[in-house]
Amino acid sequence: MKGKTLGLLLLALLLGGLFFAWKPLNAIYLSGVPAQLENEYLLIPTGASFEQVMDSLKAGRFIDNEDGFRWLAEKMKYKREVMRNGRYQIEPGWTNRELIQHLRAGKQAPVNVVLNNERLPEEVAGQVARFLEIDSITLLNAFRDPALLAEIGYTPETLISLFIPNTYQMFWNTEAKGFVLRMVKEHDAFWNKDNRRAKAQALGMTPEQVYTLASIVERETNKAGEKPAIAGVYLNRLKINMLLQADPTSVFATRDFAARRVTEFHTTFDSPYNTYLYKGLPPGPISMASIASIDAVLNPDKHDYLYFCAKPDDSGTHAFAASYSAHLVNAGRFQSWLRQRGY
């Protein structure tokens, strides 16, 4: 009888011990991230509270036991008044302990920020805001901040030349100034590569001036193979102090970006950007310039052409001429072709 009582007592103690141990065992080792996730990235905004993090974890279905996660977060001192922000890649099947260790360590997953051929700083800000936590207004304010522009050596007119179209890896919670400084670093690395600075100097131009001309080439053609020839035309004009008369600059001056054809309204619009009216390069780029366009200016075709116009076909390519009379012939052919097409 005594043995049976002792056995029951031991069983009761064992069951009691399991009862009290179940919660920590379940919270630490048995519960956690589900084996299947709809989205593997958790975003924790800047200034988020613990409850906001919990809301994100539940909304994204990153945890299967809220009570267990809360309990362990307290024990592991993950819970704070202001939580560590960022974008975190979550692995399916992690325990709560592994998940908390990952978030507490701040091991962020970078994002790919893609810059294409945006035309204006506000378009750059809007594009970047698609990938980062920061909003476009805050970015644009940084782009216009006189103190920051002075610090990095740019003006509102030349700022667009800072941005090299490419894909950049950075953290989702990168701040506005941090983004700008990263672009300075990438810009410098680009110009220090492939002898670009020396090539610009050989042309008698600064990198910003090369970029400005490249932005015109960018808007003149989508054909990469033609860019060195078009760059050569404009460089030839600059050498003899001839008006560039670049249609894209007059469009930029008027901000009539939807225009399908350049008219007298565009070419006579008074603006320092209008190269029909003012000699030399405009005050700054008229858009972002692709790497192909920048390198076309740095490595132009050597020729004596001073003119070009679209060919009378659907190729999107151009006919080049060294004399104005030859250019008029090319232009006449193109105009005739347009009339035949009903334009």
Image (spheres, rainbow, N blue to C red):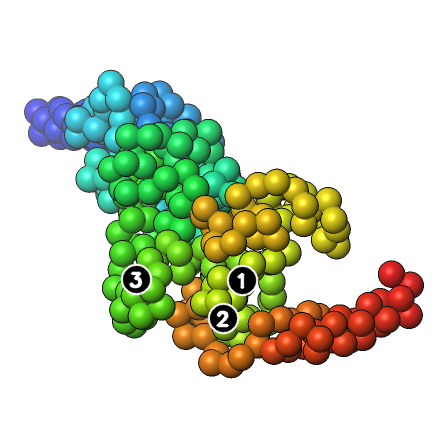
Residues under labels 3 and 1: Cα distance?
28 Å
For disc 3, the neighbor class at 10 Å (few under 14, some 14 to 19, many from 20) is: some
Task: Identify the residue position indicated by label 2 in the image.
Answer: 236
Residue in the foreground of this view, choosing between 190 and 94: 190
Query: In the figure, 149 relative to 2: above or below?
Result: below
Query: In the figure, 310 relative to 151: above or below?
Result: below
Residues under labels 3 and 2: Cα distance?
23 Å
Residue 49's disc is: none
Question: Percent position (x, y) of residue 197?
Answer: 28, 65
Residue 340 in view in this figure: yes
Residue drawn 12% across the image and 28% down it: 10
Q: Which comes before the other along the chain, label 3 or label 2?
A: 3
User: Relative to residue 125, is residue 174 drawn left or right?
Assistant: left
Question: Percent position (x, y) of residue 150?
Answer: 28, 36
Residue drawn 46% across the image and 29% down it: 137
Question: Percent position (x, y) of residue 206?
Answer: 33, 58
Element type where label 3 sits in the image: helix
Residue 191's disc is: 3
Task: Identify the residue position indicated by label 1 in the image.
Answer: 242
Residue in the foreground of this view, choosing between 153 and 168: 153
Amino acid found under the numbered disc labelled 3 = Trp
User: Relative to residue 315, is residue 103 drawn left or right?
Assistant: left
Residues under labels 2 and 1: Cα distance?
8 Å
The mark closer to the camera, 2 or 1, is 1
* Residue 200, quarter of picture: bottom left
Question: Percent position (x, y) of residue 209?
Answer: 40, 56
Amino acid found under the numbered disc labelled 2 = Asn
